[in-house]
Image (cartoon, grey):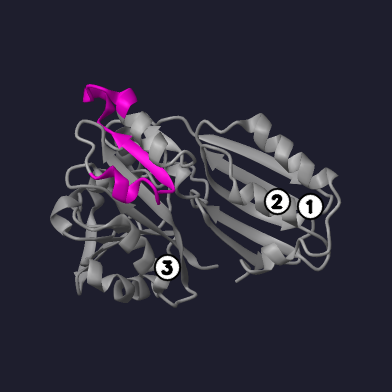
Amino acid sequence: MSVPVLAVAGHLGAGKTTLLNHLLRNGSGARIGALVNDFGAVNIDAMLVAGQVDAMASLANGCICCVTDDGEVAEMLGKLAAVKPRLDLIVVEASGVAEPPALARTIMAVDDNRFHYAGLVLVVDAVAPTGLEHGARVADLIVLNKVSVAEDLEAVRGTVRALNPVAPVVATDFAKVDPRLLIDPAPRPPRAQMSFDELLHDEHHDHDHPAYQSIEFRCDTALNPRLFMNLLRDRPQGLYRAKGFVDFGPAHRYLLQLVGGSVRFERTRRAGTELVFIGTEIDADALRSALDECVRVPADEQGILGVLKFVV
């Protein structure tokens, strides 16, 4: 499987690096690669740097940080994609002046099947929300940061929602976004006793996360591909990610990866549909109703064509 590449954008001071540090501290064992503009802003000391070569720092917890500018993204993504063991996520932090659409296009334009674009997270300073028009329209997840000191949070939320009525909006302080919204925790073997470093990490772990929602769907009947693609295209408000196995019939069984508006299908032989939908404030009843319709309504012969163009 290819490595997901997540773009994080926002104006200077909005909290992009704070969000990155939060993910590095609370990744539940996930191996994260980070492309940043400046090591100085990332809490390297707290991550116990093991070494540094060619602007790449290998962290003791398996994560990696690279210093880059916006013109070197493609080159550094290639370096991170070659890391062994394989990374679970690559985060590209845009400079404060970078245009979010341009960053997304840069990542999507890189022709390398070792990684794939996994959406754009826009961090918004709720106290001084400037330049929203450039990023909110294309964002897959919007983080309203510093909400406890914002004078008119509802006005900011309304502006964001007017620009993007679909993307989940997470209100928080110190960019404390639940990591499960962005990455699947890596499995960790059980330990009879925690090490001192693990105890120290657990003590300082940021447990105060905004609401996280996970909705599961299982079915042994082949789904209607046309209706399913309509559901992904017109995804319910608050839905950010979907993953799992989708069965459209014996010749069309796939592994699905959805992040925002980005859809990928990979062929598999696994029968049956098992999906997890992830987001915040999703209308679970509406989602399940749409999925039930995909089961109930017979498929037409041309419906699968809408799926095939997203198969990698």
Residue at image position (30%, 50%) is 134
Q: Is residue 60 left or right of residue 180?
A: left
Mark 3 surroundings within 10 Å by alpha-carbon count, few (fewer than 14), some (14 through 19), many (20 or more): some
Image quadrant assignment for residue 159: top left
Does residue 152 lie above or below 38 as drawn?
above
Mark closest to the chain's N terminus, 1 or 3: 3
Kind of residue at disc 3: Met
Image quadrant assignment for residue 173: top left
Disc 3 designates what residue? 108
Whether the magenta-drawn stretch holds residue 153 is answered as yes
Q: Nearer the viewer, residue 25 or 178?
A: 178
Label 1 SS:
loop
Q: Are marks 1 and 3 in contact (CB under 8 Å)?
A: no
Mark 2 surroundings within 10 Å by alpha-carbon count, few (fewer than 14), some (14 through 19), many (20 or more): many
Mark closest to the chain's N terminus, 2 or 1: 1
Disc 1 designates what residue? 223
Residue 228 tag number: 2
From the top left corner, tell me how far across and down residue 269 is, in percent. 76, 66
Q: Which residues are magenta?
A: 131-155
Whether the magenta-drawn stretch holds residue 138 is answered as yes
Residue 266 makes an appearance in the image = yes
Between the C-alphas of marks 3 and 2, the distance is: 24 Å
Kind of residue at disc 2: Phe
Mark closest to the chain's N terminus, 3 or 2: 3
Q: Are marks 2 and 1 in contact (CB under 8 Å)?
A: yes
Q: Quadrant of the C terminus?
A: bottom right
From the top left corner, tell me how far across and down residue 119 is, in percent. 43, 55
Mark 1 surroundings within 10 Å by alpha-carbon count, few (fewer than 14), some (14 through 19), many (20 or more): many
